[in-house]
């Protein structure tokens, strides 16, 4: 029985379609009784037409001009009744001035995708050749909000208790060795949850999963002929729509359900989901790029423009979204609220987030309204907010990102410090001591939870490559090796690239374990890059953004071939979970405030209580007093880590423990498996409680109980 | 093959027999059938889908509607689903909200 509420009763008709003045809020296409409410903002257009298509049809079934009385302020809003909502796609034509110098680029010949589209058609199957002749490539669709979440809700695990795992959805399971039913999809990630669970990670950070076009800027490598694509997806088309090509059900239009099912299942297994979101630019590029959405809707509002109407390029991708314009701010806020409430995501990592703190002409704002708004938004109140605190325009804000008591940061300084220490650079001990404490020098008032620690991420070398290459090898990207970072602080361990020399291979494995050990023992929040736990290589490519192939795909045979690395990573992650003294919410005070006889943290060298801070020192050790765990609120063991980045074996004297306690060996990266790490509770006692030898470039972890 | 649905309710067990393709063009028929049966307050819903060859998003929506309309206390059994239908239920996670069985017997 149709709903006949008078406020949803048609008052107008156009070519047989029944209409009524719509609601201006919410923006986008919203299901209402017996129809759909369409609402879109444009401040400078002169008129707007709603264009309706049957799904996948090249030509519209109707184009309905918004009657002038359906425009409220700068918002066109209209209800259309009796639509077959499962089978329609929609877009808009905006008429207005073409005056680039004044910032206007209206073109009514273009059908524009709704920035609020909840689903987007046109790229439903990954890398399926599109119909290039279709004039409407990215086609707004409706989505239903009827998913059966049962009791699910965001997990709200304290951030200091998380171990992040940065994952590319397709790369995780696309390799033939993954053994999943639908490789490269959300459904396939779900199949692999047991692996993640066993590894011990409890937070997935997904590289972009908003709708993007993998065909964007596609080209063939001039020599190899390989098709290079927009593989990583840092180029958003639809901020409210999941990437249909990542869904096994994308061709059936069920990508929304499939992604929600993944999130629900991850939550069921105690794993949070953080989305990597890209609000700094869009897929429309600069003035030479396609008109997809924002450019044709209200160019001057949505983009940062130079005085002569060109696009500021603080993103390095052609344009910059004008995020501190109130209207754009609302888009960002609406988007995040939508993902938090409708998809139950647990937080967001903001790509090139420093851009979000720039004013409309690019100057950094002292009090950026967008960042403040997000920090204080009630719906996002429990979400993790994480900034990549720099941009391509030279703004670098690690340690100084406007945080409002909420924001955490990818700590790029942590990455660089650990890398330099691991390759035995001199002069690193002082900085390293800060980094392993959660960088109090950077986050004194914010606490260690502001620091997302990582040694590797999608940008740059994989962990295996970090110890196999001195130089980037990006020739396969077809840019003459000019792309990608040059300051990698890597060391090839004695040979550039692949080798069969046992001593080099052994050193590289040890270095991978060393890096993981420092990462998992540091205060702050550790992030592991997908595949680093099994020694995934990109063959020296440190910018694999364009490769849909072995370079990015996780080879699941590595789980067997590098079983010792996987075992080491797994036990180390579980070690972190078992020891709250590694997961403090507040900075150390360097004093004994629980009457334990030990300060919360103390620093040591080869001799206990005598750390060598000198320039040429490559030795560092620290002791965490278990009685201070979580500021003295939890009981824990003592944890001691000794790091020897000298190229010779050294003798260490660990600090004495309280009466009745003994040192036990949790890990020693200088030993061969299985003596490199032990299960919790199975750690053997240290033979000589006062002295041990630690091999070159190795780390020893002891627990005192 | 066009979609067909028939239903009966016995001892508070509602049984639907579905065949053909359940897509946007046919989902309204199924939905109306669900609404008709729901009014009789069944305590169990059984979907006999051996001859259902395909289910689109619209079909999934009706299943979700049925679950929400009848409430979580009313278990839903999906019986003898063909591989494409089963696959769709699994990929979208809906298999966790219903009982997927190969055969069905009424409770004694």
Image (cartoon, coloured by chain):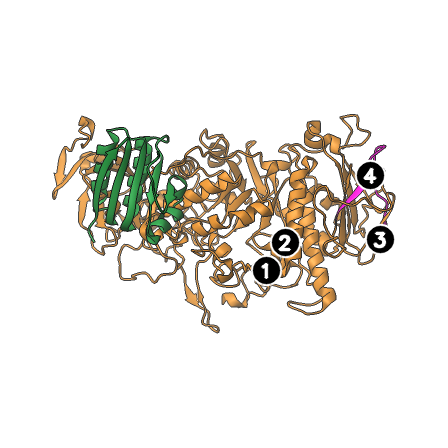
Chain colours: A orange, B green
Left or right: A351 with respect to A302?
right
How packed is label 2: few (under 14 Cα within 10 Å), some, or many (20 or more)? Answer: many
In whole angstroms, how far apart are the C-alphas of marks 2 and 4? 28 Å
Q: Residue furthest front?
A: B108
> Upstream in the sequence, badge 1 or badge 4?
1
Task: Residue A399: give x, y in percent of width and height.
Answer: 62, 40
Q: Chain of mark 2?
A: A
Task: Residue B62: give x, y in percent of width and height.
Answer: 28, 40
Task: Residue A38: give x, y in percent of width and height.
Answer: 26, 39
To which residue does mark 3 refer? Answer: A650
To which residue does mark 2 refer? Answer: A566
Q: Residue at point 51% right, 63% down?
A: A550
> Upstream in the sequence, badge 3 or badge 2?
2
> Upstream in the sequence, badge 3 or badge 4?
3
Left or right: A467 with respect to A235?
right
Per the rendered image, the range of residues in magenta is A651-667
Q: How many marks?
A: 4
To which residue does mark 4 refer? Answer: A662
Magenta span contains residue A657: yes
In whole angstroms, how far apart are the C-alphas of marks 3 and 2? 27 Å
Q: Chain of mark 1?
A: A
Mark whose residue sits in front, 1 or 3: 1
Q: Chain of mark 4?
A: A
> Upstream in the sequence, badge 2 or badge 1?
1
């Amino acid at each position: 029985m149709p709903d006949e509420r008078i406020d949803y009763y048609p008052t107008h008709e156009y070519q047989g379609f029944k209409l009524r003045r719509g609601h201006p809020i919410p923006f986008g296409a919203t299901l209402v009784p017996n129809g759909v409410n369409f609402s879109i903002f444009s401040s400078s257009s002169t008129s707007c037409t709603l264009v309706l298509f049957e799904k996948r049809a090249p030509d519209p079934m109707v184009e309905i001009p918004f009657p002038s009385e359906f425009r409220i302020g700068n918002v066109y809003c209209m209800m259309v009744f009796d639509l077959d909502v499962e089978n329609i796609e929609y877009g808009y034509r905006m008429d207005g001035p073409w005056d680039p110098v004044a910032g206007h680029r209206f073109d009514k010949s273009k059908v524009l995708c709704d920035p609020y589209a909840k689903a987007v058609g046109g790229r439903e199957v990954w890398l399926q050749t599109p119909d290039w002749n279709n004039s409407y490539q990215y086609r707004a669709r409706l989505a239903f909000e009827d998913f059966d979440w049962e009791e699910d809700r965001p997990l709200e695990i304290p951030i200091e208790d998380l171990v992040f795992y940065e994952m590319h959805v397709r790369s995780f399971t696309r390799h033939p060795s993954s053994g999943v039913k639908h490789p490269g999809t959300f459904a396939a990630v779900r199949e692999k949850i047991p692996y993640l669970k066993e590894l011990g990670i409890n937070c997935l950070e997904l590289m972009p999963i908003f709708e993007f076009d993998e065909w964007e800027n596609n080209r063939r490598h001039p020599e190899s002929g390989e098709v290079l694509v927009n593989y990583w997806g840092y180029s958003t088309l639809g901020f409210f729509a999941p990437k249909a090509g990542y869904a096994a059900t994308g061709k059936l239009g069920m990508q929304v359900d499939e992604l929600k099912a993944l999130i629900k299942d991850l939550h069921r297994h105690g794993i949070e989901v953080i989305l990597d979101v890209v609000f700094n630019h869009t897929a429309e590029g600069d003035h030479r790029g396609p008109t997809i959405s924002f450019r044709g809707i209200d160019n001057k509002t949505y983009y940062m423009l130079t005085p002569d109407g060109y696009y500021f390029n603080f993103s390095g991708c052609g344009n910059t979204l004008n995020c501190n314009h109130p209207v754009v701010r609302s888009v960002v806020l609406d988007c995040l609220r939508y993902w938090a409430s409708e998809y139950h995501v647990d937080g967001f990592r903001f790509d090139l987030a420093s851009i979000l703190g720039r004013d409309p002409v690019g100057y950094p704002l002292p009090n950026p309204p967008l960042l403040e708004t997000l920090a204080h938004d009630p719906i996002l109140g429990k979400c993790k907010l994480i900034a990549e605190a720099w941009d391509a325009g030279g703004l670098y804000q690690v340690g100084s990102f406007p945080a409002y008591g909420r924001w955490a940061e990818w700590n790029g300084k942590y990455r660089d410090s650990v890398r330099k220490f691991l390759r035995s650079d001199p002069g690193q001990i002082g900085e390293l001591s800060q980094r392993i404490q959660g960088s109090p020098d950077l986050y004194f008032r914010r606490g260690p939870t502001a620091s997302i620690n990582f040694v590797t991420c999608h940008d740059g070398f994989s962990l295996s490559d970090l110890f196999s290459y001195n130089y980037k090898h990006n020739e396969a990207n077809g840019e003459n090796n000019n792309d990608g970072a040059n300051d990698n602080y890597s060391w090839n361990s004695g040979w550039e690239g692949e080798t069969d020399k046992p001593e080099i291979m052994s050193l590289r494995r040890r270095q991978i374990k060393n890096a993981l050990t420092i990462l998992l023992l540091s205060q702050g929040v550790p992030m592991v890059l997908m595949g680093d736990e099994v020694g995934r290589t990109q063959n020296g490519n440190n910018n694999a953004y364009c490769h849909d192939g072995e370079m990015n795909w996780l080879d699941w045979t590595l789980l067997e071939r590098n079983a010792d690395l996987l075992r080491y990573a797994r036990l180390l992650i579980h070690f972190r979970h078992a020891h709250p003294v590694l997961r403090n919410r507040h900075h150390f005070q360097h004093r004994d405030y629980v009457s334990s006889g030990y300060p919360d943290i103390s620093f040591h060298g080869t001799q206990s209580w005598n750390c060598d801070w000198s320039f040429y020192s490559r030795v560092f050790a620290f002791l965490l007093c278990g009685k201070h765990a979580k500021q003295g609120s939890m009981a824990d063991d003592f944890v001691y880590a000794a790091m020897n980045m000298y190229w010779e074996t050294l003798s260490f004297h660990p600090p004495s423990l309280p009466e009745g306690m003994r040192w036990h060996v949790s890990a020693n990266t200088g030993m061969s498996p299985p003596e490199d790490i032990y299960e919790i509770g199975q750690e053997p006692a240290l033979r000589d409680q006062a002295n041990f030898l630690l091999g070159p470039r190795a780390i020893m972890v002891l627990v005192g109980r | 093959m066009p979609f067909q649905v028939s239903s009966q309710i016995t001892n508070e067990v509602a049984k639907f027999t579905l065949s053909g393709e359940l897509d946007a063009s046919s989902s309204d028929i199924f939905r109306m059938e669900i609404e008709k049966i729901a009014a009789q307050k069944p305590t169990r819903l059984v979907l006999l889908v051996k001859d259902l060859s395909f289910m689109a998003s619209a079909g999934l929506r009706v299943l979700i509607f049925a679950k929400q309309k009848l409430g979580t206390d009313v278990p839903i059994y999906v019986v003898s689903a063909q591989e494409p239908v089963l696959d769709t239920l699994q990929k979208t996670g809906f298999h966790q909200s219903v009982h997927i069985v190969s055969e069905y017997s009424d409770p004694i």
